[in-house]
Image: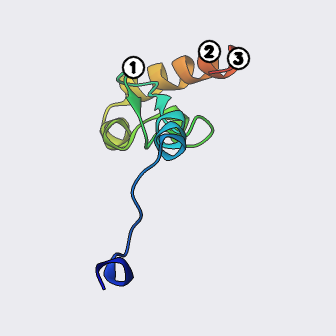
Amino acid sequence: MKDSQKSTKDATASDVEAIVSNHAVCSGCDEEKATVDRYMFDGLCADCTDRALYDYKFQKQAQKTNRVLIEHGY
């Protein structure tokens, strides 16, 4: 009965690799985070996207950094 009530499966090594590979470097804080999409929001994580709304210099620097990261295939 426990097995039928179990809603999620145990993570396997391939699941963990898929999760880790979905992370990308943020063009604002330079940390690997799951919320980064290189082609949306200038490659910013969720926290840095919020900061970019209010900090124009930060936003412009992130755009430049994101262009460099795209050109180098990151």
Amino acid type for the residue under numbered disc 2: Val
Amino acid type for the residue under numbered disc 3: Glu
From the image, tell me which residue sits under label 1. 30
> Quick check: 39 above or below 10?
above
Query: In whole angstroms, how far apart are the C-alphas of marks 2 and 1?
Result: 13 Å
Query: In whole angstroms, how far apart are the C-alphas of marks 1 and 3?
Result: 16 Å
> Quick check: 46 above or below 68?
below
- Apparent side of residue 58 relative to residue 39 in the rendered image (left or right): left
Q: Rate crowding at label 3 as few (under 14), some (14 to 19) or many (20 or more) other CA atoms within 10 Å.
A: few
Q: Rate crowding at label 2 as few (under 14), some (14 to 19) or many (20 or more) other CA atoms within 10 Å.
A: few
From the image, tell me which residue sits under label 3. 71
Where is residue 34 shown, x and y percent of the image? 43, 41
Secondary structure of the residue carrying tag 1 is loop
Depth order, front residue of 6/47: 6
Q: Earlier in the sequence, mark 2 or mark 1?
A: 1
Secondary structure of the residue carrying tag 2 is helix
From the image, tell me which residue sits under label 2. 68
Residue displayed at 58% across by 43% down: 40
Amino acid type for the residue under numbered disc 1: Asp
Numbered circle sitting on residue 65: none
- The quarter in which the N terminus is drawn is bottom left
